[in-house]
Amino acid sequence: MEAGTALYRNGLHRFKVYFADIVGRLEPGRYEWDRSGLERNALLAGLQRMGVEGVGFVCAFPHITKVFRFAPSGETNLHVRAFDTASLEEVSLLRAESYLEVSCLAEAILVGEEHRMWAEAATVTQYLDRFAAWEPAAVVAPGKLRRHYDSAG
């Protein structure tokens, strides 16, 4: 799942960056960094140009990048923004029926690990010194929700 890590710095603003792959999809160039034609450093430079601020982490796939920051108004909350990785145009996380997309499986794993590391760290520096360990994660039975709703009972 992991295609590398980096640290984004912009003044006092700091983000751990996780370059993530999704392997086994039909369009590997859309989901795997080494097959995408995109440069990891270009994403870091783009975040710098955009002036991304705060402290937190970034989950960057070749097709979408989400920036998670610990809320300045309440450090136990995370704020999230999404961008198309290649163009860095903002992507809406609004989905059907007025729901917001929070995360995919890989991002959810990171959210849990990063939140725990944030809570355990006494300083921002201590937080930034640790990156989450990636474990392979796969959905055992894709389509179970559709099958549930399609079932008679």
Image: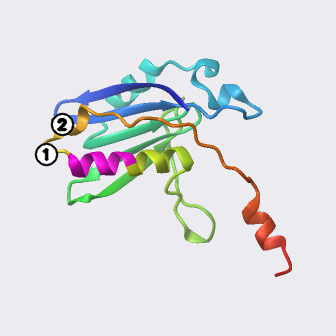
Query: Relative to 149, is 19 on the left or the right?
Result: left
Q: Position of residue 84 (x, y in %)?
A: 53, 38
Q: Is residue 72 above or below residue 106?
A: below
Residue 35 sits inside the magenta stretch: no
Q: Would you say the residues marked 1 and 2 are in contact, meaning their CB atoms lie under 8 Å apart? A: yes
Front residue of 45 and 19: 19
Q: Position of residue 108 (x, y in %)?
A: 48, 51
Quadrant location of the C terminus in the rendered image: bottom right
Task: Give the prevailing secondary structure in the magenta stretch.
Answer: helix
Marking on residue 45: none
Which coloring applies here? rainbow
Q: Which quadrant would residue 43 be assigned to in this image?
A: top left
Look at 50% across and 18% down and name the residue there: 39
Query: Relative to 6, is 26 on the left or the right?
Result: right
Front residue of 80 and 49: 80
Front residue of 4 and 62: 4
Marking on residue 126: 2
Question: What is the CA distance from the residue labelled 1 to the residue labelled 2?
Answer: 7 Å
Q: Is residue 145 above or below residue 114?
A: below
Label 1: how many residues lie within 10 Å, few (<14), some (14-19) or many (20+)? few
Q: Position of residue 98 (x, y in %)?
A: 56, 70
Q: Position of residue 143 (x, y in %)?
A: 76, 57
Instruction: Farthest residue to the right: give it.
Output: 152
Query: What kind of element bears circle 1?
Result: loop
Instruction: Farthest residue to the left: give it.
Output: 122
| Residue beneath disc 1 | 122
- Residue type marked 1: Ala
Span shown in magenta:
113-120
Label 2: how many residues lie within 10 Å, few (<14), some (14-19) or many (20+)? few
